[in-house]
Image (spheres, rainbow, N blue to C red):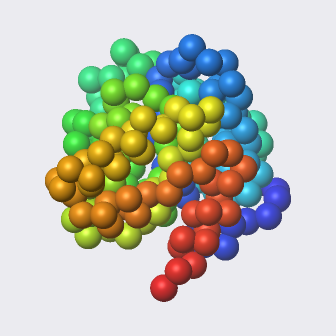
Amino acid sequence: MTGPTSPGLTSLCVYCGARTGADPTHRAAAERLGRLLGERRIRLVFGAGSAGLMGAVADAALAAGGDAIGVIPRHLTRAERAHDRLTEVHVVESMHERKQRMFDLADAFAVLPGGLGTLDETMEIITWRQLRLHRKPVALIDHRGYWRPFVDLIGHVVDRGFADPSARGLFVTVESVDDVVPEIEALLAEP
C-alpha cells in the first residue's frame, strides 16, 4: 500500500446497508469513503457483505490498495453473499459475536446510510458508549440528510427526560465523507 498513514486511526468500522438504497449518491459516498480509507492505509472493518453499500465501500478500499476485514455470522454467508476478495474474513457464530468482533477490530465507527441492521449496530455502539464500555468515536455520515431523523429522535428522547442531555454528545454528525477521518482523528487526540 502507498499513501499517508493516519496517525491515530488505524482501523475504522463502517456500518452501512446491504442495499444501495433509492438515492444513487449514497453509493458514491460509500465508494468515496472506501477510497479515502484505502489511500490513508486505514483498515476497513465491516459486515463482510458483497452487495449494497457494504460491497461498494469494500471494493473501493481494496481498489485503493487498502485492507478490508469482514465479519459475518455463519448463517448469513449465503443470504448476504460474503465478499470474496477481502483481506480477512472472520466467520462467527452469532450476530452478537459479529458486533463484538467488529468492535474489537476497530478504533472508531462511521455510519453510512443503511437499514434496520445498520440502525441496530449504530444504536448499540452508541449505547455501549453511554454505558462507558468504550470511548471510541462514533460518526454519523449525514449524507443528504439521511441521519437527520435519527439525530432528531435522540433529541426527542432527551427533551422528554428519558436520557441525559449528554446523550447528544455520544456521537458526532458530519455531512461529508471527506470530514469523517479528520473528525475522528481529532476526537482520538482528545485526552
- At horizontal 61% and vertical 36% (from top left) the residue drawn is 143
Q: Is residue 94 above or below residue 82?
A: below
Q: Is residue 2 above or below residue 85?
A: below
Image location of residue 127, percent across then percent down: 26, 55
Task: Tell me: 20 left or right of 64.
Answer: left
150 and 75: which is toward the camera: 150
Tell me if I can see residue 106 in this picture.
no
- At horizontal 27% and vertical 54% (from top left) the residue drawn is 158
Image location of residue 175, percent across then percent down: 63, 45
148 and 94: which is toward the camera: 148
Identify the image quadrant of the N terminus.
bottom right
Image location of residue 174, percent across then percent down: 60, 50
Tell me if I can see residue 20 in this picture.
yes
- At horizontal 41% and vertical 19% (from top left) the residue drawn is 80
Task: Tell me: 47 left or right of 87.
Answer: left
Task: Tell me: 177 left or right of 118.
Answer: right
Q: Looking at the image, which residue sits at the far front?
A: 159
88 and 118: which is toward the camera: 118
Image location of residue 129, percent across then percent down: 31, 62
- At horizontal 37% and vertical 23% (from top left) the residue drawn is 77
